[in-house]
Image (cartoon, rainbow, N blue to C red):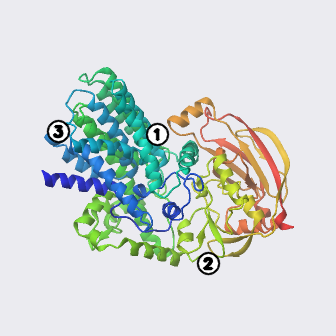
Amino acid sequence: MIFLNLIILLTSILAIAPILPYPPALGLDASWILAMNQAISQNIVIGRELIFTFGPYSVLQTNAYHPDNYEVGLIVGLLLSICYCLFFLRNKKFIEDRLYIWLFISLIMADSRDALLLSYPLLIALHSCYSLSRIHSPYSLKIIDKIHLILSISLLGLLPLVKISIAPMVLISSLACFYTYLVNGKRMIAIGYITIPAVSMMLLWRLSGQPLDGLQDYLNSIPLIISGYAEAMSKPSEMKLMTSGPVWQIFIYIIAALGVVLNILLNNKLNLRLRIIVILILAAYLFLSYKAGFVRHDSHAQTAGYALLLTLLPLYMYSFLKISKWLNVLIILVWASIHFFYLIGSLLLSYSDLRHSDKGIVVNDITLKKYNSDKLKQYIVNDWRDVLFGNIPRVNGLVDVGGALNLYVLHNLQSVAIGELSRRDFKIEFVKGLESISNNVRLPKLAGTSDIYPFDQSALIASGNIWNTRPVIQSYSTYNSKLLKLNAAHLEGPSAPDNIIFRLDTIDHRYPTLDDGLSLPIIISKYKITGRDSNYLYFKRNQVPTSIDYRSIHSNPSKLGQYNHLPNTEEPIIASININQTLLGKVWQFVYKPPPLNIKVELIDGSIENYKFIQSMANTGFIISPRISSNLEFAMLSEGNFHLLSKNRVKGFEINANNEDNWFWDNSFTLELKAVTFHAYE
């Protein structure tokens, strides 16, 4: 039995702790991952000088190595893993009913660290309810159990420091535990569920090297990040492999979740009040998992599927859920259908990349609509070996089963089993990773401090330049007016970087100048282009202060679907657009995600272009004309060569809701247009 316990403990550690971390790499996600670690290394205050969805212990989510903070992350990760595992190993029913088999299977099927971390406060809340249910005697409080419980409660304070979006579940769990003990007359224990996580959060914050007075700023940044995410980062639910998921994934998730809730509700062995408390805690967990999975409905959906899978074991172990084979099968099918949908999509994507790499074609989007039936038949029937095995990962020459199936715990288990851990030197891998980035993206060494737009922090950090970050490190994340203003104020203030490395790029086919739209005129005015290459423009801060003049040329209400004419002028035009949601729209954003808006622009030559429109990023103003969509065009704008952009002038535009019967957005909105004069040109 000891050997079995050690296997379960090892699997738990490999699932939660960063035992086999990754070196730095290029890419959008890889850039913020390295940036968060680098920020801790440079003593940048998270929540004040840098605002993002992650905190100082992001390594538990990203599994990324950095020599200056890896050890601390590893220690707290090990503690979290052990506490998580002991909730099961110290439970009699877990051993007697051989539920350890289910735990082992659940852990090796892990495809989402989000879901695993989110399940920890759920586990504590369910344990609290179980301890007071009197249905089964809880394990006796020996000294090891007391230490385990106190340490487990204290680690609730860790999770919001990993990722901001876990904070609501931690708060709900703590309040639920507080209430269950308080109504049972155990006041001191109830208070402990509130005070212990709060104190541990402060201690862990300081342990990460952050100043204590910065914790309040970090907590204040939580609503800033969470509130704007749903609109700005949402993706439609449609049948696109890898890029979007189908609506049926949402339906089967909801059906399975309701099945779990109904099972608990009909469990007459529990008193009604306890059933209601458990259902409310579980509903919060399932709702947050649903939002994490289906707002940005791409491979994020795996978070929802795996979160649902993780509910079964603790609910059975604590006797809140009646044994139901059909419910088990349903939930496993939900997880499998979501997981393998994206696994197949990634296989097709990597196969297509392999097939076209010799021609230099980069395939970013494979959809079922994109290929005719003959092409799909060729993929599935004739070339199935290449699709399945053409790009299969390997570890020391052996097939990496976990990597191939996108199951990271299984990958870690295999790596440990073949001795991969003892052969790796993480510091050397880190240095080699930076060298590889630097060799792939050769940035010049610039005098003074530097920042990079819109992302690509990996390239900047690897180049050896001194990184001076704006508060919101990646421009696509400036998805409300407060975040936009923070970045703009940074450029206006004394701590602005001496250099800006710039590339015009965005995500989700947004209007190109929406991201950091308030900062772009400031860059044009206060910085001057000193160089360029095939990837970037290089700006140097002007020695003489400059200013921007705005001249109002239009300020009137408009309507969705109404064509708005723009003046026929070479001057850049800034548009400030404020569209409000209806009450139904606000409710729909809370329970799901807001229906998208799009902006249709007509250029001076009569051509029409459509883009995704984020209203929360548009009310502070963005450059609407000329339409800028490349580095070359932004350079022309920055250098005052407006005549070269005459074909990019926008003749007019309209904003539309994607649904015909618009119930979610006010039809009327405010529109203000301003012509801009950049005194840097004079």
Give the mark nearer the N terminus: 2 vs 3: 3
Q: Do the residues labelled 1 and 3 touch (CB within 8 Å)?
A: no
- Tag 2 residue: 445
Mark nearer the N terminus (2 vs 1)? 1
Q: Is mark 1 on a helix, strand or loop?
A: helix
Residue at the spot 56% in from the left edge and 56% down from the top edge: 45
**Whole-percent x, y for residue 341 in the image:** 37, 51
Give the residue at x 42% y 38%: 195
Real-space Cα distance between discs 2 and 3? 62 Å
Within 10 Å of disc 3 (Cα), the crowding (few <14, some 14-19, many 20+) is: some
Residue 248 visible in the current orientation: no
Given residues 166 and 327, the one toward you in this image is 166
Q: Classify mark 2: helix, strand or loop.
A: loop
Picture quadrant where residue 99 is located:
top left
Mark toward the start of the polypeptide (1 vs 3): 3
Task: Identify the residue shown where x is 74% and y is 60%.
Answer: 522
Residue 207, above or below 399: above
Q: Is mark 3 on a helix, strand or loop?
A: helix
- For the residue pair 286 and 431, the one nearer the viewer reads as 431
Which amino acid, mark 3?
Lys
